[in-house]
Amino acid sequence: MTPNENSISIFPQADLVPTPYRIESPIEQRQYLIDGVIKEWTGPLQDVLSPICETVHGGMQRKLIGRYPLLGEEQALEALDAACGAYDHERGVWPTLSVEERIRHIEAFVYRMKTQRNDIVKLLMWEIAKALPDAEKEFDRTIDYIRDTIDALKDLDRISSRFVIEQGVIGQIRRAPLGVVLCMGPFNYPLNETFTTLIPALIMGNTVLFKPPKLGVLLLKPLLDAFRDSFPKGVVNTVYGEGQKVIAPIMRSGRVDVLAFIGSSKVADMLKQQHPKPHRLRCVLGLEARNPGIVLKDANLELAIKECVLGSLSFNGQRCTALKILFVHRDIVEDFLTKFSDTVDALTCGVPWDAGVQITPLPEINKTEYLLELIEDARAMGATVVNQGGRVHHTFMYPAVVYPVGPGMRLYSEEQFGPIVPIVPFSDIKEPMNYITQSNYGQQVSLFGSDPLVMAKLIDPLVNQVCRVNINSQCQRGPDTFPFTGRKDSAEGTLSVSDALRVFSIRSLVAAKNTDENRHIIKSITTERMSRFLSTDFIF
Ligand code: G3H
C-alpha cells in the first residue's frame, strides 16, 4: 500500500488476520513473579490497546488485546525485599555460585525461552506493531546476545583465572557482582533492550528487579515460568505498574545498587534523584539521540538515499539510533529530494504481518497528533511536506519528508521518534558541524561522501562529538559486540556484549606479598579448590 491508495484498508478486518497471528480474546495477565513465586493479582489492571485498530460500531478504535497488573507500593517493596534477600550482601546462593554454574542457569533459561518464540513474536506485532521479520529478528538477536554474553564471560573468566606478580606482590583479580539491579527497557525494543541489561546483570551474579516498558508488557508474560524455574528464588523479580507508584518507592529505599534504564533523560534524572545516596548508585543509561545524516555533494546518491531511508524510517523511525535529521548539500538537494521522496512513497505500508511491510501503525498514545503538530509548526515557518506523506489515519502516519527545515522549527531540535524526515539544506559544512556541536545529544552520525581527504577532515572532529561515525552507512547499534554509547544527554556508560559484563560488576582482588608462607597458602587453597574466588579453574 502506498500513500496514493485508500488508507482505510491499512487496518485489516478481524477475519483477515492470518490465523497464527490472531488474538481471539484479550489476554488477561494477573501473574507477576516475586521471590520465586508466580502470584495472582486481584487488584486493578491496565488495558493494553494495540496500535492496530479495528472497526467497532462503524468507527475505528485500537483493539483491546489484554490487561496487565497495576501493582502498588507494597508489591514493589516486596519484590525489592526478595531481590535484596536473594543477594544477601553477596552471601546469597546466586552471587556465590561459580561462573560455570551461573552459565548453566542462563543456558537453562535460553532453552525455555526459545520455546516461546512464536508467542513473543506475535505479541511484539500486536503490542508495538513491529513488522513480522523485525519482530523475529528482535527475538533471534536476543538469543544470539545471550549466547555471545556466555562466551564473553567464559573469556573473561579464563583471563581472571591466572595470577599476576608485580613488584613483589601476587594478585588474582576477578570481577564480582554489585548487588541489586533495577532494569527498565524501552518500548521500541521491549525484549532485546531489556535483556541486554538483564542478562549481563544476572550472569555476573547480581539479583534483578525488572519493570517492562509502558508498551510491550504482555510479551514478557510467556517468560515468567522460565524465569521462576531457571533461577534460585528472588534472583529475578517483576514489577508491573505505574512508575510513580512502583519505581519511586524502590529508588527511595536506597537499596538499588545499579540502575539500568533505557528511556528519556528526564525520567533517568528523576530516578537518580530519588535515590538517597546517589553516589552509591551506578547507572547505565541509554537516552535520547538525534543522529544527523550529512550528505556531501560528492556522495553516491543512490547509496546515500538507500541508507538514509533505512536509517530514518526503519520501524517508523522509532529507534534511538534512527537518523532524525538530514543535512544535504544545496548542490544536490533537489535531486536528493526527488529520489528520496519517490523511495519513501514506494515503501509498503500496512500491519505487521503484511508481506514486505515497512511502515506500520504507531503504538504511543496520541503520537500521530504530536507528529502533525511538528509538521504544522514547520509549515508555519515555511517548510512543506515534499512527498505524498504526512496524512494520518488513527494510529498510522504515512511517512513525511519535510523541507526545508531550519533553526527555530521544532523539527530542527525535537526528537520526533516517528515517520517524519526533516531535511536541512547546507552550503557550508560548518552548518551541520555547528548543529552537532551545539546539540544536546551525542550518539552517532552518518557521513555520506566519496573524497577520502574530505571525509578524514570531518571524521576527526566528529568522533569527539559523538561516539560512532558511520561512513556511507546508516546509524545503528549493531554488531552487538561493538561499543554502544553516547555523549551529553544520550547515554551514561557503555553497552556491548563484553562492556555490559564490566558495567554490572566491579573488580575485586586477592593480593599477598610474594613470600614462602603466602605462596604456600595460595597454592593449598587453589590445589584443594577451597575458594570460589581464589582459583585457577579454567572454563572450557
Ligand atoms: O533504540 C535504540 C536501539 O538500541 C537501536 O538499535 O540500531 O539495532 O536498531 P538498532
Image: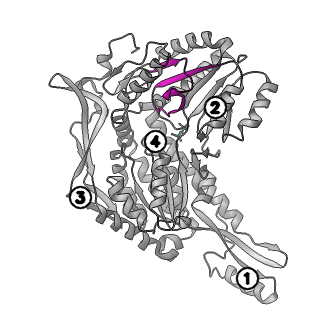
Nearer to us: label 4 or label 2 = 2
Compute the Cα span from label 1 to label 2.
60 Å
Nearer to us: label 1 or label 2 = 2
Q: Where is residue 310 in the image (x, y as percent from the top left)?
A: 55, 26
Pick whichever of labels 4 and 3 is earlier in the sequence.
3
So how many labels did they put on this image? 4
Query: How packed is label 2: few (under 14 Cα within 10 Å), some, or many (20 or more)?
Result: some
Above or below for 320 versus 234 = above
Q: Identify the mark at residue 83; answer none if there is no mark.
A: none
Q: What's under tag 1, amino acid-wise?
A: Lys
Nearer to us: label 1 or label 3 = 3
Q: Identify the mark at residue 41; answer none if there is no mark.
A: 3
Q: Can residue 379 be seen in this view?
A: yes
Residue denoted by label 1: 523
Q: What's under tag 4, amino acid-wise?
A: Tyr
Q: Residue at x 65, y 25 (%)?
A: 294
Compute the Cα span from label 1 to label 3.
54 Å
Q: Identify the mark at residue 435; answer none if there is no mark.
A: 2
